[in-house]
Image (tube, helix red, strand yellow):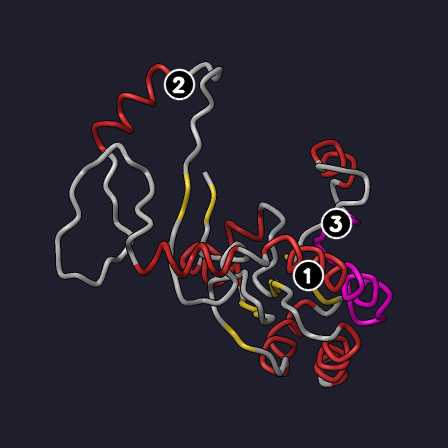
Amino acid sequence: MTSLTKVFSGDSNVMAGSVVLKESGRFYSVLKPLMDKEYEELLWSGNGKESTPTVVYTNTNTEDAIFLERNSRSFMERSKRINATAEYLADMLVAHPKVGQVYYPKYITTAEYNAVKRSADSGYGGLMSIVLKHKEAGVQLFDALDICKGPSLGTNFTLSCPYTIIAHYDELDWAESCGVSRYLVRVSIGLEDPEELWAVFSRALDQCH
């Protein structure tokens, strides 16, 4: 299962997801009949007709599907650029004296990530989380970052969100007991120039304790 709303699309103008059933998988014989029975085509068609269950898992006549396909044509190119920019930014953040931790596969659980990378020259993705040495200063960092703020991470422009607060608002103490700081700032990297993007982060860090 994967979201197609995020980097696969990138343009933030369509919502979609995908499920792939592997015929040799151990649960295929159970899941396939359920999919045939329960699947609904919910990509927006703009024609006022209600969706009906079908075993055809794509409908290329719908506007959502048209936009999704169009947006996806540059997916590989955009992914490579996002990977490179994210790694550059992560390297800069790790070296910054006010940054306590950068949660990014290049620096944490690296062996596990490398074990499932498609190729040796694949990147580490465009998503990272930041915790400052003075953890409460994460509030200042989030407020000072001159980038778009939003909960859906994975667009052609860089986004940030206070992830722990969004995901665990009523259980922040529990989250911290599991090692997840309530002041964590999550960032997804877009297609901006790497040096210009770092300048934005550098200015924001200058305003933090």
Q: Position of residue 180 (x, y in %)?
A: 60, 52
Residue extent of the magenta highlight: 87-107
Query: Circle 2 sits on which residue?
Result: 28
Q: Position of residue 201 (x, y in %)?
A: 72, 77
Label 2 CA crowd tier, 10 Å (few <14, some 14–19, many 20+) = few
Callout 3, which amino acid? Answer: Gly
Q: Residue at x 72, y 76 (%)?
A: 197
Indicate the quadrant where residue 93 lies. Answer: bottom right
Label 1 CA crowd tier, 10 Å (few <14, some 14–19, many 20+) = many
Element on which disc 1 rests: helix
- Give the mark nearest the N terminus, 1 or 2: 2
Front-lying residue, 194 or 138: 194
Assess whether residue 50 is covered by the magenta stretch: no
Query: Circle 3 sits on which residue?
Result: 123
Q: Are marks 3 and 1 in contact (CB under 8 Å)?
A: yes
Q: Position of residue 15 (x, y in %)?
A: 38, 57
Q: Residue at x 60, y 75 (%)?
A: 142
Q: Residue at x 54, y 60 (%)?
A: 154
Element on which disc 2 rests: helix
**Spatial separation of the CA atoms under disc 1 and disc 2:** 34 Å
In the rendered view of the protein, which quadrant contains the N terminus? top left
Residue 82 marker: 1
In the rendered image, the vertical position of residue 18 relative to residue 142, given as above or below: above
In the rendered view of the protein, which quadrant contains the C terminus? bottom right
Q: Residue at x 40, y 18 (%)?
A: 28
